[in-house]
Amino acid sequence: MTSAQQGGSSRPTPTKKLRMGIIGIGVGATQIMPQMESLEEIDLVAGADTDPEVRKAFQERYPEARVYDTAEGLCNDPNVDAVWVSTPNNWHCPHTIMAANAGKHVVCEKPMAATVADCRRMIDAARRHEVCLIPGHNRLFFPPIVKARQIIEAGALG
């Protein structure tokens, strides 16, 4: 008998949490982090930023997480499965490619890149390294969006 037949959630129970790192842990990321905290499938394990004050605030909020002053440091962390790129738009392409080259799955905030050519380079890097690349937006984890996903997963719509 499945959990759905037993009256439980039809959503599969994760066997392993996704260990997420965020490149760019400043203002934009502060909109995402609380929602990540609420998801049992995600473990926020690392953050990277060039601003020492931002790194300090992140470390105070997430004392168990590792903190890096470079994107390279975070991408080279073997305990990070996926990277959320929350840097200024002109850095989306190089940071996404860096993460993909390190074998990390990537969620890149919108806009994905400044040019179509950069988008193609990002997609090519993800394909070459067989990682997922998701262009996302920080509203992805906002409560109304999460609720809509739950309604859809429950089969209440279409």
Image (spheres, helix red, strand yellow):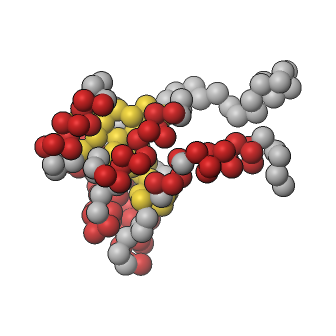
Residue at 36% x, 49% y: name it: 29
The answer to whether residue 130 is visible is no
Indicate the position of residue 81 as horizontal and vertical percent values.
40, 38
Residue at 29% x, 63% y: name it: 88
Relative depth, front residue between 47 and 77 = 47
Indicate the position of residue 102 as horizontal and vertical percent values.
31, 47
In the rendered image, the quadrant that contains the N terminus is: top right
Relative depth, front residue between 66 and 104 = 66
Compared to residue 144, the image places residue 92 above or below, namely below
Q: Could you tell whether 81 is left or right of 26 in the image?
A: right
Q: In which quarter of the image is residue 95?
A: bottom left
Q: Could you tell whether 146 is left or right of 126 in the image?
A: right
In the rendered image, the quadrant that contains the C terminus is: bottom right
Residue at 43% x, 31% y: name it: 43
Q: Quadrant of residue 108?
A: bottom left
Q: Quadrant of residue 20?
A: top left
Number of marks in the rendered image: 0
Residue at 49% x, 58% y: name it: 136
Indicate the position of residue 107 as horizontal and vertical percent values.
44, 53
The answer to whether residue 48 is visible is yes
Indicate the position of residue 111 as horizontal and vertical percent values.
42, 68
- Outermost residue toward the left in this view: 52
